[in-house]
Amino acid sequence: MRGLATVFLLLLSFHAFSQVDHWETIIKANEQWSYFLGTTTPVATEPASNWRTLAFDDSGWAQGAGGIGYGDGDDGTTLDVSGIQVMSVFLRKKFTVVDKSKIESAILSVDYDDGFIAYLNGTEIARANMDGRGDFPPYNTASNGFGDEALVNPLPFSVDNQKLQTAIIQGENVLAVQVHNENASSSDLTSNVYFSVGINDASFTYQTTPSWFTAPAVFSSDLPILIINTTGSQPIPDDPKIVATMGVIDNGPGNRNHSTDPFNNYNGYIAIETRGESSQMFPKKSYSLETQDAAGENINVELLGFPAENDWILYAPYTDKTMMRNEITFKLSRDIGRYASRTRACEVILNGDYQGVYTLMERIKVDDGRVNIASLNPDEVTGDDLTGGYILRVDKIDRNDYPAWNSGGLDFQYFDPAGEDLVAQQQVYIQNFISAVNSSINGAGFANPETGYARYIDVASFVDNMLISELGLNVDGYRFSTYMYKDKDSKGGKLVLGPLWDFNLAYGNVDYNTAVQSPTNAFGNPAGGWLYKDFRMFWFPRLMSDPNFQNKMKTRWTSLRENKLSNTRITFLIDSMATSLEEAQVRNYERWPILGTYVWPNQYIGNTYAQEVAWFKNWIISRANWMDTNMPGTIVDPDPVTGVDDEFVQAGVSVYPNPGNDVFTIEWSNSSFEQCRVEIINALGEQVFTSVENGSSVTWRTTSSQRSVVNAGVYFVRVTNTRGTNVVKKLVKL
């Protein structure tokens, strides 16, 4: 459950700001207010229960200029609290709406200490540091946190548009606010309140907005728009996560998205924190977030068409001025049959402030739609149960990380499950397994296919991971952000390298550690040399010393260069992504004017976005061409009949959600399955679905008006290509 101290009313929509011509302020803090003190001593005092409504008669209340408070020197009316204990102050301010039809939206700006709830004609429109939602706390309720009366400007609260249009009326209205202390002995209380509205035409009726007032960002985009609001525009810390709300606008392919459109993909709570290591120094921050319900429990959501989950990352491309290096990398990985995070470019508004282009990414974790291995529970400490699944990482270690362990001179981290979630037997098991991996790679008979490294590692995954890492010449590759996972022994049990992660400093976007980068392309940027030969994990140069491993690398690379990693395909992907970002990148670089300037650790500095993209594209093509010429090994045909190596075929098909209820997606990324037949077979061997496909996925709906309901149970998905090679996956319908 979310702690009571962090439950706030976080308003869930950004409203119809597209119709706003300008903003005016109806109520300012220094105007005359009616007020009533809620005291605990010498006697208890509390207003009538209908005090927040328009009909209430406040003629018996005190009058004074706002803000109403004491103890901090910024009050229009300073309360005399000698001999009494003030837990709360109740405020009322009547105002007249001349023409309701001209009011499109509203923002309440509040400087408060310590908590408050605001009402418009009796309807709650904002709250901070007060428990509950929609209730009316009595006078002696303590706030659940400290407000910040020392803020330079009041904090903005966007008023839900539906509430606004329902509550506000033509003619006389009342804004009512109750402000609460954190305790009865508090040394100060602050209540400075402003009420501003967005007007939909050029007429001017009320007052000019204060100099500090900032109108919300309004724009339309061909990318999805994410709108995040924290309580009172609270800054997002590195740790821990704080509660916020997020709305996602995605009107589908070919449709414009407006920042004022209704939230149609997600509209609810999140827990959010900043993320990253060196990227924390940049002003454009990346975030980790979890989708949650009102009680603070994680909920799985299909954000932007991704398989339902609750762990997400909003990556902020900054030093990568193409804003696509990670996206291209992960797409290439999925294309060759290796799961990497799905990504969508989007634009982000945080607390009314436009933040630019971001990439929504799936966080790496054990899940049917992500790293599809067995979940490991704390009670699984013997037999096959103990053997999986584990996700591990080799990376930088910061103060928040669970202690890593060293094996063979390498520091390994538990990633999923996290170290604190593993019991002692599980930690010992995976440590011993990694020790065996190290010994198998380092041993004298390491190349023996039965007793050497091939006994412990999924060789094909190492080949694929290395090929993409080498293509990117990723300066952090093989030493940081290097993930690996192990499933149960009954499901293969070998160590799989991946998913790939963190390529923002790859593809020549770095001006240090260039010892391996000697040849240059027409742009003068280094694109040669082998990454694995640099100071990295010993695994990779050792593996490359085995002729059989070299041959697999050569064969796989040559095959992929014919289709998924061809120059034509790579160029197409980059050009397509650049086209999709062409409009949004203009806004991004107006917000962050870094084109033509050095941002650590740029090797190339383009004056325009087009120049950055052209340089990246030419770099990767030069790199791929260099690898064609310099790849060691000999091309071999693993199967003279099919021409396909089954080690690489199996990785390309996934089914999600699994288990699931009604709609299932069967997805394949291996190039040999571009034309295939998809069959779904029940436990009796009966075919319940079949389809011939020329794409990369198909959707199976188990209920429709054309077919009877498919029963719950176990089914088998068989995907067969034109050469007769097939992959079979189990599917569970709930």
Image: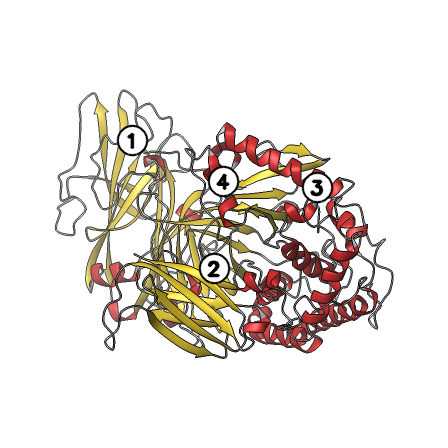
Nearer to me, 353 or 665: 665
- What amino acid is found at the position of numbered circle 2 in the picture? Ile
Q: Position of residue 363 (x, y in %)?
A: 51, 52
**Can see residue 474?**
yes
- State which mark lies toward you, 4 or 2: 4
Is residue 8 found left or right of 505 in the rendered image?
A: left
Disc number placed over residue 142 in the picture, else none: 1
Of mark 1 and mark 4, the one earlier in the sequence is 1
Q: CA distance from mark 4 to mark 2?
A: 33 Å
Of mark 4 and mark 3, the one earlier in the sequence is 4
Of mark 4 and mark 2, the one earlier in the sequence is 2
Is residue 369 found left or right of 269 in the rendered image?
A: right
Look at mark 3 in the image and give the residue it sits on.
440
Nearer to me, 709 or 209: 709
**Can see residue 219?**
no
Is residue 198 found left or right of 153 in the rendered image?
A: left
Q: CA distance from mark 3 to mark 1?
A: 63 Å
